Image: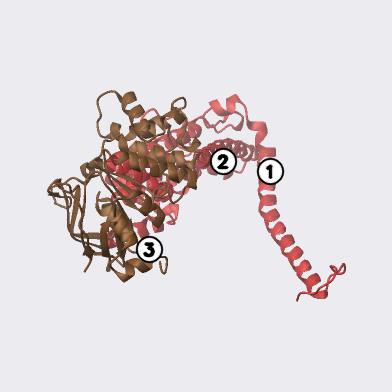
Amino acid sequence: MARVHDIDMRGKAPALEARDLSVFYGEVEAVRRISLSIPSNRVVALIGPSGCGKSTLLRCFNRMNDMVRGARVDGEVLFHGQDLYDARIDPVEVRRRIGMVFQKPNPFPKSIFDNTAFGPRVNGFRGNLDGLVEDSLRRAALWEEVRDRLGESAYALSGGQQQRLCIARTLAVTPEIILMDEPASALDPIATSKIEDLIQELKKEYTIVIVTHNMQQAARISDYTAFLYMGELVEYGPTDLIFTNPEKARTEAYITGRFG
Amino acid sequence: MSRLGPLGTTPTPRNLRRRVLGAAFAGVGAAATLVGVLALVVLLADVVRDGVGQLDLDFLANFASRIPGRAGIRAPLFGTLWIMALTAAISIPLSVGAALYLEEYAPRNWVTRVIQVNIANLAGVPSIVYGILGLAVFVRWMSLDRSVLAGALTLSMLVLPVIILAAQEAIRAVPGSIRNAAYGLGATRWQVVRHHVLPMAAPGILTGTILALSRAVGETAPLIMVGAVAFIAFTPTGLGDPFTVLPLQVYDWIRRPQEEFRLLAAGAILVLLAILMTMNATAILLRNRFQRNRP
């Protein structure tokens, strides 16, 4: 059974809470009865070797696994006291409230402006779209670089800029939680550090769950770290404790680079 | 194998054999290519020599006639354009709808697998079979008679599987990351299809459609089955009118004993070829634009 250190909720309800969550791809159980709470306005890192289920777990938090043919989810994910997998919940609404940034920058083949405005537009935003686009790009620390070229194709941007555009695009639909699936793994070190700075900035207003292969990154940016192995949650606790004084031998072996 | 020292300047027997073999294969390949190209060039040259003298405004504007000097292709030219437009109007919405359903909506189970296999098989059914189907269903059962609508419906059945397959291919080529991005922003399935999948797949779908239609334009057999007649002295004015098409006119003329009609047929072939080449050129242009716009 996973050892779970104290997660300080500071008297607030958790932003997300997984209870006995399992995911099956056909017969394969990719996530096994995981329970964990994500505190609000914190950065939680999910780490573990390839295929350990961390991305699958992340995709449970905004029902992106619905899009995967043959995937089945058991258990509950509580968000404001509601189970995201309740039959009455509309997954489209879930994804608006819980945004996602993907591993490879995936801007649409449209202008920078239209990329940022897409989410608000499809969600029926009525208001000052120009202002919302500017605000989102500012929050994603991209505005100064693109303010004079909003009409240009998003593909004209560098990889790091594209990823910040994807973050801006997510912010434009005003989510409460942002899920990030290895958001910097396709980027160079400078672009990576910009994304990391941005994450620190964003956690003032958002709750962030980030999957990362890079343990230094997890140590640098996260408040809590969950270590997954073979679909199970091995250990979950404050990041400094997990990295300096892990309780499980397997966690220690992984963070010291002896496997994975 | 490896020898130290300077490179040898005379090839070893083994290396010589390899070089000869390589050169021989290149020669065989070039010859194979030439056979195809030459046959086409000879055919084209023959048609152009016979037909180019026929091409003038009268030839395009006159109806068919028993007197070769007065005969033209007005009726089949209009018939071909009618058939092409109608077939496109019927087959594009149906096949794009089917392709979108199969790729974006339908669950993957044995039912959709059976449908998929059948579409692939239907694409290979001989066109005369579609002619028989058109005769039974559209001409007789739906009492459409020998109308341009019955002809277009029959050809639509013929091109439907081909366009569905091409459209599916184009839809599948839209990167999954784009769909993920849109879904992740709270877009509904329809919004993802409408704003991303369709625009990105459109050039590919159009290319496939044009190629399929250009095949349909050259068809003769199914239209004979549904009763298109070679000799009519008017152009269709509505969906219920009889019609003829260029390949049928060619067939009719080529059967006649007089040399003049053979030349007229060559002229009609040239017009048909011009239509086909225009369509294929459009398809190529679209494909090139498509490739430039890829992420």
What subunit carries mark 2?
A: B
Q: CA distance from mark 3 to mark 1?
A: 78 Å
Spot the residue most to the right: B10
Q: CA distance from mark 1 to mark 2?
A: 17 Å
Circle nearer the viewer, 1 or 2: 1
The residue at which mark 3 appears reads as A255
Identify the residue at image location x=34%, y=47%: B180
**Residue type, numbered disc 3:** Ile
Which of the image's four quarters has the N terminus of chain B?
bottom right
CA neighbours of label 1 inside 10 A, class few (<14), some (14 to 19), many (20+): few
Q: Is residue A153 visible?
A: yes
Relative to the observer, which residue lies in front, B243 or B22?
Answer: B22
CA neighbours of label 3 inside 10 A, class few (<14), some (14 to 19), many (20+): many
Relative to the observer, which residue lies in front, B34 or A193?
Answer: A193
Chain A rendering hue: brown
**Residue type, numbered disc 2:** Trp
What subunit carries mark 3?
A: A
Q: Are marks 1 and 2 in contact (CB under 8 Å)?
A: no
Chain B rendering hue: red
Query: Would residue A88 be found to the left or right of residue B144 on screen?
Result: left
Instruction: Give the label on residue B253, or none.
Output: 2
SS at badge 2 = helix
x, y percent for residue A65: 27, 54
x, y percent for residue B165: 41, 51
x, y percent for residue B103: 34, 51
Relative height, residue A45 to residue B56 (above, below):
below
Instruction: Give the label on residue B46, or none.
Output: 1
